[in-house]
């Protein structure tokens, strides 16, 4: 399964700097795996950057987002 990476110009600083997961924003202090290259630009400035995700064995908080909503919860 392939997910589209967000626009590099819209990434929060920790994600853009490689310190946090591109999907869930969790710290990658204990390691991360490459997620791909986020592309973007502002005017003539290219903002393309390699981004990272949680390691598969540690799980990603973004997996929780894909779960069906609980009964009575609003999304």
Image: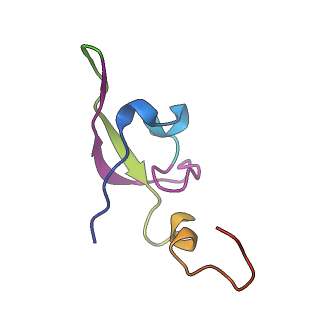
Q: Position of residue 27 (x, y in %)?
A: 58, 49
**Quadrant for the N terminus in the image:** bottom left
- The reply to whether the magenta stretch includes residue 22 is yes
Vertical order, 58 against 24 (above or below): below
Is residue 34 toward the left or the right of residue 30 in the image? left
In the image shown, does 9 or 50 lie closer to the viewer? Answer: 9
In the image shown, does 38 or 50 lie closer to the viewer? Answer: 38
Q: Residue furthest top?
A: 44
Vertical order, 71 against 26 (above or below): below
Which residue is drawn at the image coordinates 45% and 34% (left, top)?
10
In the image shown, does 35 or 8 lie closer to the viewer? Answer: 8
Vertical order, 14 against 54 (above or below): above
Residue 18's quadrant in the figure?
Answer: top left
Is residue 31 toward the left or the right of residue 44 in the image? right
Is the magenta region chiefly helix, strand or loop? loop
Q: Position of residue 21 (x, y in %)?
A: 49, 51
Residue 3's quadrant in the figure?
Answer: bottom left
Which residue is drawn at the image coordinates 40% and 30% (left, top)?
9
Q: Position of residue 39 (x, y in %)?
A: 27, 36
Which residue is drawn at the image coordinates 52% and 64% (left, top)?
62
The part of the chain drawn in magenta is 21-42
Q: Position of residue 65 (x, y in %)?
A: 55, 69
**Quadrant for the C terminus in the image:** bottom right
Which residue is drawn at the image coordinates 47% and 72% (left, top)?
57
In the image shown, does 36 or 42 lie closer to the viewer? Answer: 42
- The reply to whether the magenta stretch includes residue 35 is yes
């Amino acid at each position: 399964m392939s997910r589209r990476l967000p626009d590099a110009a819209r990434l929060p600083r920790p994600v853009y700097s490689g310190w946090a997961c591109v999907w869930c924003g969790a710290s990658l202090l204990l390691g991360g795996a490459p997620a791909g290259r986020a592309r973007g630009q502002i005017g003539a400035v290219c903002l393309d950057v390699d981004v990272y995700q949680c390691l598969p064995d540690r799980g990603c908080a973004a997996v929780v987002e894909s779960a069906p909503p609980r009964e009575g919860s609003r999304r």
